[in-house]
Image (cartoon, rainbow, N blue to C red):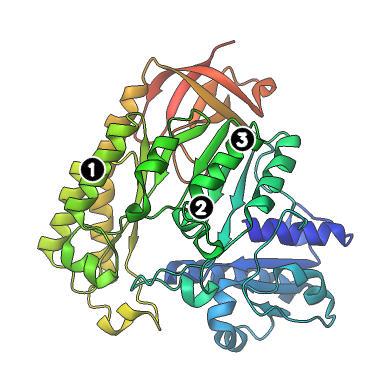
Amino acid sequence: MVDSEVMLGYLLQAGYHFVDKIEEADIIIINTCGFIEPARQEARQAINEALALKHQKPAIKIVVIGCYVERSREELAKEFPSISVLSGVKDFPHIVNLIEGKKFTPSSQTFLYSHTTPRALATPPVWAYIKISEGCSHQCGFCTIPLIKGPYRSRPLESIINEIQALEAKGIIEINLISHDTTYYGRDLGLRHGLISLLENILGQTSIPWIRILYGYPEEVSDDLLTLFQEKRICPYLDLPFQHAHPRIIKMMGRGLDGSRSLRLIEKIRSKIPEIALRTSLIVGFPGETNHEFQALLDFVKQAEFDHLGVFTYSAERDTPNYSLGNPLSEKEKERRREEVMRLQAEISRQKNQRFLHQKLEVLCDEFMTNGQKFILARTRYQAPEVDGIVYLRPGNPKYLNSLRQAVITSSGVYDLKGKIIK
């Protein structure tokens, strides 16, 4: 999304304007993900839909850009010869030249924006993502990110602060720090405690009331970082992808913590931050995952009691260390295991949400919904945007939009809450 917002910024700067309906477009830009096969399938579907429109209106330009192209440019060119422009992850700032067919000097590394880069936010006007780095230097056996994006590169701390200050001046209330590993931030810049330094500077140089950290590595969560969470402006929320629990699979994945060590870490986090909301990502169907190893994962989920959880089915990715293991489990069996984990998590989530009943919580109101009934859609500090549940609030009055409010939670479900705004 951030890269797309940067392209929007450059296009607006060059005088382009945007249309609500794809049928009205002269140019269609598809920013693709190439991380796993389901994402590539989604990209191909979007490309086919755009090309179907081009068949009716031959003058339309179809621009396909991003990670999928970086990984499979020749394959895409062969499969979709009618695409007007194919470009990877290095040339986002050259989107205008790409569209207009002008020559430019290609970038030598993955694009990483700065506070001076034009950017048009596509999120609601009260929250934004802040990308603090690009690439990844971990060598997880299943992951293509280092192949696509290259090694970890941190943005200068001053650039991040300048961007946040500018967003604050525009009314941003919540920032979400994102990276392929936020807890790694600053190591390439020589910062020993990079994320801590960044957070301390955000706290000291801005007044942003909600600061959220996404995508950390479990083994990099330090006591000093947890101590910093005592600061109320840092949302009590951590997104830590544990991936699996069984020691053999963790070792094969090239990950650091098995289930028992992960549970000790979770216990420590909760002892220091009792109200913390924990999110994780897991992979099922890893090559050779036995019923016993899958049961170990289920037992881990039962004991960990995550607030939020996402599950991926294993995708065999060429050129990764795990690719040589093959892909012996059927897609049907992998999906069955994914559904079993999610059924278990649904009950855990339902019970977790009940703790909010009749509580007064601060909520960020960022959307208005009219669907037979009028609601304000909001989130608590325990819910990240786009991936977690939401709070349906009444009265559904647009005057509450784009603000922090106090609300009483009146009912809870598996993922979402309902409440009443305190006037």
Disc 3 to disc 2, how far (Cα)?
15 Å
Q: Is residue 387 visible?
A: yes
- Local crowd size for mark 1, using a 10 Å CA cut-off: few (<14), some (14–19), many (≥20): some
Looking at the rendered structure, which numbered label has been put on residue 204?
A: 3
Disc 2 to disc 1, how far (Cα)?
28 Å
Looking at the rendered structure, which numbered label has been put on residue 96?
A: none
Look at 23% across and 78% down and name the residue there. 328
Q: Residue 19: give x, y in percent of width and height.
A: 79, 54
Look at 37% across and 54% down and name the residue there. 220
Q: Nearer the viewer, mark 2 or mark 1?
A: 2
- Local crowd size for mark 2, using a 10 Å CA cut-off: few (<14), some (14–19), many (≥20): many
Quadrant of the snapshot with the C terminus? top right
Q: Is residue 209 above or below residue 310?
A: above
Quarter of the image holding residue 65? bottom right
Q: Amino acid at mark 3?
A: Gly
Q: Residue 201: give x, y in percent of width and height.
A: 60, 41
- Local crowd size for mark 3, using a 10 Å CA cut-off: few (<14), some (14–19), many (≥20): few
Identify the mark nearer the N-term, 2 or 1.
Answer: 2
Element under disc 1? helix
Quarter of the image holding residue 64? bottom right
Query: Along the line of sight, which residue is nearer the eye, 44 or 9?
Result: 9
Look at 44% across and 67% down and name the residue there. 38
Q: Amino acid at mark 1?
A: Ala
Disc 1 to disc 3, how far (Cα)?
34 Å
Q: Nearer the viewer, mark 1 or mark 3?
A: 3
Q: Is residue 403 above or below residue 223?
A: above
Q: Which residue is mark 2?
A: 194
Quadrant of the snapshot with the N terminus? bottom right
- Please give left or right for residue 406 compared with residue 341 in the image: right
Q: Which residue is mark 1?
A: 304
